[in-house]
Amino acid sequence: MDVDMAEADGPDVFVQKSNSFLSWLEGTGATVSSKIRLEDLRQQHRGRGVLAKQDIAEDEELFAVPRAAVLNTETSTLPDELKTHFDDPWLSLITVMIYEYQRGTESKWKPYFDVLPETFTTLMFWQSEELKYLAGSAVVNKIGKESADEAFMDKIVPILKKHTQVFKTDGIDDAQLLKLCHRMGSTIMAYAFDLEKPESDQLKPGDEEWEDDEEETEILPKGMVPMADMLNADADRNNAKLYYEEDKVVMKSIKPIKAGEELFNDYGPLPNADVLRRYGYTTENYSKYDVVDIDLATIKRRSEMQHKETPKYNIEDRLQYLEEQGVLDDGYDVAQHGSEDFEQFPEELCIVLNTLCAANEDFDKWKRKDKLPKPEMADDALRLLYDILAERRADYGFPEVDPKDISTPKQMDAWRVLAGEKSVLREAAETVQQLRSQSGGFAQDSSSGFEQVARSIKAARGQTNGGSDNKRKNEGDQDQELEGTAKRTKTG
């Protein structure tokens, strides 16, 4: 998997750890096909990976791991009263992993921990100056470092300090314990699987049942599945899948694999921003899933500007009604046109915009009848959406950076995230203009016109508040940072 994997280990140590891990794995009762091998892919910045030694047919078993060898709260030897201390399964698994890791050679999972990463390049570990590279992207607000620190210090660290003999944490200060919590939490984020129940435990039709049910969602327990997490991920080259059986989990090929080819899992339709947040890298193969968050504050602000001359316009009344109807959210994702996994404009967003742009009499009628407008956007709603998209585009800044001038992986990852999201915005603006033209509304010209509108919004912000608004004080900084760094790199 594409996270830092003991980069300091020399080739011999790296191979020795891999071999010890495989020997341990087979000792648990796991089976590994003779057609695959664990490979050192650090030269490609991909840590360990799994390669085919021979041609593999579709639906061949690649390896099978007993459920007893999966590291989770049920299989750990941590005393039960400490396992059940938390309601949150994440906190429970972090605690279990700290316990097993601290036991060292006393833990049966020691060879497994030896091949897991010690450091990460996920956003949780970026410095504040580095996060400026991503200003404009909503992903910065999804990192959650402060809330994680609070949860760890309030809930896990006191347990580790109270039971030092159990956790072997005597003499370790709070800062180191917090660092250990983050390491295990990030390991879970990058490597853990949602452990589906074996078929015999599945709820029967008619029984009351985090994923498939829209009304009552079940949070699946997470666990660390040895060997399964050695596969790297690729949205386009996915050729293997994990299956859950009664007493084991099995990785199988889902298409023919040639000798020498790498085995790839798939994260699903994750945008690059979330791949970077969770796994610490980006790739063009996930750019097709890129989205841009349209936050409610921006929707509200642009709507108020558009309707400032409208008599008796009450936006709070409309927002409250939308909330009562269950369509109001903190934000909405705009996706690429033609995406197989996401609507370009979510239906809920379209309904919100139509409601905010409706004449007072139309809104009053819907409210009396307890109804909502249809999602097909009226011209006023399309005009509002265009302005919202332009404002979001202004958030990213404008100095464009040539990726050839960027020298560090973090800067390249940030560039790829921002380039993808800005492309989504330009494409969305073009769609809006096409829809307006088709309906007889006035449409501005192409992407250059959209960029100019966004630049005007950016300039107006500086004139009205000097760029000091807290929400937007770092807007555009990332492009200047990337551009400046690129120039410094080129000039030495």
Image (cartoon, rainbow, N blue to C red):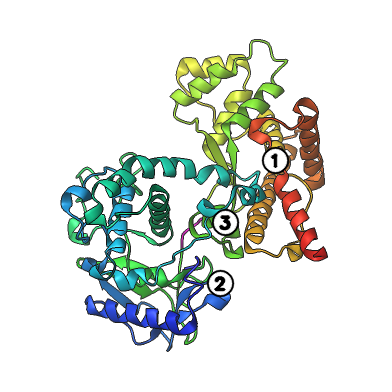
- Residue type at mark 1 is Glu
Residue 210 screen position, x and y as percent? 34, 47
Residue 8 screen position, x and y as percent? 50, 73
C-beta proximity under 8 Å, tags 1 and 3: no
- Residue type at mark 3 is Asn
Q: Which residue is mark 1?
A: 475
Q: CA distance from mark 1 to mark 3?
A: 20 Å
Identify whether 75 is placed above or below 92: below
Q: Secondary structure at mark 3?
A: helix
Q: CA distance from mark 2 to mark 1?
A: 31 Å
In the picture, the disc for residue 313 is: none
Image quarter in which the C terminus is found: bottom right
Looking at marks 1 and 3 on the same chain, the residue that comes earlier in the sequence is marked by 3
Residue 160 screen position, x and y as percent? 29, 49
Q: Is residue 43 visible to the viewer in this orientation of the structure? A: yes
Q: Secondary structure at mark 1?
A: loop
**Residue at image point 76% right, 49% down:** 480
**Residue at image point 82% right, 46% down:** 448
Q: Which residue is mark 2?
A: 45
Q: Residues within 10 Å of mark 3 (few under 14, many from 20)?
A: many
Q: Which residues are magenta?
A: 267-272
Q: Secondary structure at mark 2?
A: loop
Identify whether 186 is placed above or below 361: below
Q: Which residue is mark 3?
A: 272
Observer-nearest residue: 35 or 344?
35
Magenta stretch encompasses residue 251:
no
Would residue 242 appear left or right of 207 to someone viewing this image? right
- Residue type at mark 2 is His
